[in-house]
Image: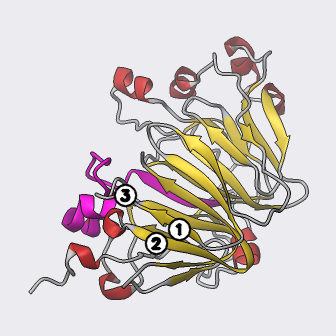
Amino acid sequence: MSNYPESRELYFLQFKPIYMQRIWGGELLAKKLNRTDLPQLNPNDDPIGESWEITDREDAQSVAVNGVLAGKTLRELIEHYNKDLLGYLHTGKSFPLLVKFIDAGQRLSLQVHPDEEYCRKNNDGAEPKTEMWYIADCEKHGEILAGLTARATRDLLVEKLSSPQAADLLQRFPSQVGDSYFIQAGTVHAIGAGNLIFEIQQNSDTTYRISDWGRVDKNGKPRTLHLEQGIKAIGFSNRMSPRIPAVTGETGFNRKFRIVDRHCFKVDCLRLVEKYPDNTGNPGASFHLLSVMKGKALISAENKESVTLNFGDSVLVPANLGNYIIEPLDGNATVLKSFLA
């Protein structure tokens, strides 16, 4: 007898976060999200800087924590359920997204990710990586650096990379809760200290670090830079502002805003004050990944066990589930919905 239920019995899936130590990590995961399961670290250890909410990589596998499939890895679920879980629009063998929180106690390195063209041309094992950020919370001094300024030529950037003046060649924005940033592959960027960022990205862990602001680790050694690959990966012709300002003001009705609309993934921001019906399609076109960025929400469907999501929680809606309802609790809620289309 199989220990997997039939596909029609798939349900709302939740996963255990995977915590990653980073030299620049902070304390906002504990303070803002009340993550009581954070590992206890020694004083000399690097702090926790990332919480991978859902991931399907060889070195990092999300594990289901609810229902009869608890204990199964995301890879195992995909191998068994395939398009019933991910949808007919998905053509790969692994989950197409990597979704995480970034807890920046210090400024992250200045970096860039490669695009599809770079990966085709260089064939060096790099994976394309386009991502978006949502500022879930921030401190007053929080800052985002993303996108080159008009004066940032290739030669000038290379000249300034070893100095703090490199930051002046980037577009700089004060952090505001609810703002989003679309970081297209090839965009030079750095997350400033004091940010709790929810990041939705292509399933890639390729990052080219082109400056680390002179930082050294606990042994006094600088981290590796990837100058040759990084400069080659930068899209110097793109000077667009990556910022997507938060929509302000309250209304008495639900509102939906498309934040990202690209071939690799879509993201809708749902600002809800009452029940919001949604549907994964018939047949299921795509999974939906729901992530609460404000308030609390109840996710329910006929003949399925409902789940309650608090701020910072996510749930995977299988593609074959069909109709379901998101209901804000205690007033209103903001939910990010990631999917393919």
Report the residue that reaches farthest toward the left: 1
**Three-letter residue code for mark 1:** Pro
Total labels drawn: 3
Above or below, 60 against 65 in this view is: above
Distance CA(mark 3)–CA(mark 2): 11 Å
In this picture, which residue range is highlighted in magenta? Answer: 76-102
**Three-letter residue code for mark 3:** Gly
Residue 318: image location, x then y, percent: 36, 67
Residue 282: image location, x then y, percent: 31, 58
Quadrant of the image occupied by residue 314: bottom right
Above or below, 155 against 200 in this view is: above
Give the residue pinned by disc 2.
Answer: 324
Q: Earlier in the sequence, mark 2 or mark 1?
A: 1
Give the residue pinned by disc 3.
Answer: 281
Few, some or many residues within 10 Å of mark 1 (<14, 14–19, 20+): few
SS for callout 3? loop
Res. 27 in view: no
Give the residue pinned by disc 1.
Answer: 277
Report the residue that reaches farthest toward the front: 252
SS for callout 1? strand
Q: Is residue 88 magenta?
A: yes
